[in-house]
Image (tube, grey):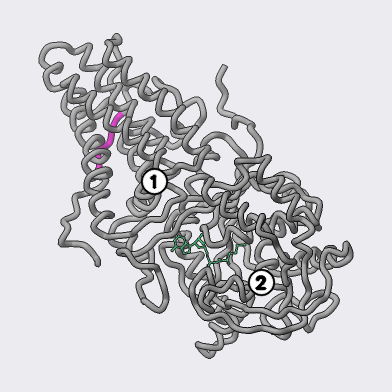
Amino acid sequence: METDKPLGKGSFYLTTPIYYVNDAPHIGHSYTTVAADALARYERLKGRDVFFLTGTDEHGQKIYRAAQACNETPETLVNQVVERYKCLWKNLFVSNDDFIRTTEPRHTRRVQKVFQRLCDKGDIYLGEYEGWYCTPCESFWTTGQLIEGKCPECSRTAERLKEVNYFFKLSKYRDKILQHIDRNPEFIQPESRRNELRNRLLAGVDDVSVSRQSLPWGIPVPMDPEHTIYVWIDALLNYITALGYDDEMERFNRYWPADVHLIGKEILWFHGAIWPAVLMALDLPLPKKVFAHGWWTIEGQKISKSLGNAIDPLKITEQYGVDAYRYFILREVPFGMDGNFSYTMLVHRINSDLGNDLGNLLMRSLTMIEKFSDGKIPSPQGTREEDINLTEGAARLETKLDEEMKALQFSQALETVWEFVAQTNKYIEESKPWVLAKKDKQALSTTLYNIAEALRLISIHISPFMPQTSREIFSQLGIPEEDRFQRSERTWGKLKPLTKTKKGKALFPRIEMSAQLA
Ligand code: MSP
């Protein structure tokens, strides 16, 4: 017997990077969070006990200087910018379960405890750092790593630094990390990024500096408060402090290790080398997967403050809608590859995939149900070969989608759903309900039922990506809230005949190219 209880496959913990609050969020930041949200919603749909964490990285030199530059205290700046992030996530329907700020006491006290523990263990020691520092990346570099004197990551000028620092024994853990990477091919994804990380580890690692001397904006080193804890150590620990590590262990025990850390490719070193080493030093299990996605450019150019081309995602969603934006960023580029944002491509996707394929499917289906069945979903009567093809298509869709979502191939997953949208459109063309209406009422009933049933399943499958559109389709089909997402509703044939449809407005009205923002 089917039940509506969750599948009970256990917990699923996923995270985004915590974003720096020196400046407002742009589409790059929204990309990771929207991807994480789609995954969180998908896993919830599967009945998993999901914990989805995002937050903000609020300490360090970069933020301290940004505050100075605008004559604000760091507190004022971070309190302002954090609101922009929170507001954006709300606008984008992001369903995070927690939001951690690194300035919160629950975080700072736990970071200090961890730091102390690593010192006690002998994995953190006092030394002298001489080398380079890139403030925008908050990264230490050796002379050999600089490229033409510039930061190898962001190509900006690095500063010479000579100061007394605490060091973490990264070198002690190098072999163990390499071994873990080799034994767990799923650990670092995609493969090309894993190879890069492996090569960097193989080339040899130094211990890393984990404190800054006389930087007033950070968490003080517990036994030496003249120093502040290096912002990356502070930041990485959010993934466990938010779960309560290590003074409220219930949540931690329920969710750790993380199922996936979603990050951008530029911060893989921190997540694939330093973070695992810290976890090993704490005797904690490593996350199951770190997925480093690619970077967005805008109309072909790197998103940068100096170019002034950063686009506020709210501007895009105001004009084009939240779901269209979510669809576009996840569909346009295979997850893991770099991508280019352009208004032309956005409008193209809206008009073709969303308007022509999906929007028209709903509109014409409901129009036919109104016209030929008095606005009520008929009972299916008999099954023809074309009907079996459609139901098989639905079953294939579910299996394929599962594989693709497991591999975090969001673009592919959406393509798979759209193959089924196309199949349903084709089913209409071939069944010709307008002809059946004149000569075969039984076949007409079956056909109209099947079309509505296909739309119901499409609505379930797009819900992780486009929650609002999914709701709209359900409500136009006349399906009440309680019948939408239970597990038992996911199989073919669960749509109740006689449901009264409520045709509404077009889902994605056509946008003329001339109406573009750019
Ligand atoms: N605070 C650190 C992360 C600490 S995690 C323990 C940080 N913050 S950030 O504000 O710079 O955000 C970086 C993340 O934003 C990237 O890893 C990526 O997820 C996202 N992106 C920022 N710009 C991006 C693009 N242009 N394209 C795609 N994603 C990018 O690093």
Taking the magenta stretch, the answer to whether it contains residue 44 is no
Tell me the distance, in whole angstroms, between the alpha carbons under discs 2 and 1: 35 Å
Horizontal arrangement in the rendering, residue 209 relative to residue 396 (left or right): right
In the image, residue 218 above or below residue 394? below
Horizontal arrangement in the rendering, residue 77 relative to residue 287 (left or right): left
The residue sitting at 34% across, 26% down in the picture is: 453
| Mark 2 neighbour density, 10 Å: few (under 14) some (14–19) many (20 or more) | many
Quick one: SS at disc 2?
helix
Circles 2, 1 touching at the beta carbon (< 8 Å): no
Image quadrant where one finds the N terminus: top right
What is the residue that sits farthest to the bottom in this orientation?
71
Res 302 seen here:
yes
Q: Is the magenta stretch mostly helix, strand or loop?
A: loop
Q: Which mark is residue 466?
A: 1
**Picture coordinates of residue 385 (x, y %)?**
28, 11
Instruction: Name the residue type under label 2.
Output: Val
**Picture coordinates of residue 164 (x, y %)?**
77, 82
The residue sitting at 34% across, 51% down in the picture is: 328
Which residue is disc 2 drawn over? 231
Disc 1: residue Cβ within 8 A of ligand 1's nearest atom: no
Asked whether 512 or 295 is in front, the reply is 295
Highlighted magenta segment, given as a residue range:
500-504
Quick one: SS at disc 1?
loop
The residue sitting at 38% across, 42% down in the picture is: 471
**Picture coordinates of residue 283 (x, y %)?**
81, 51
Image quadrant where one finds the C terminus: bottom left
Res 244 seen here:
no
Disc 2: residue Cβ within 8 A of ligand 1's nearest atom: yes
Taking the magenta stretch, the answer to whether it contains residue 501 is yes
Instruction: Name the residue type under label 1.
Output: Met
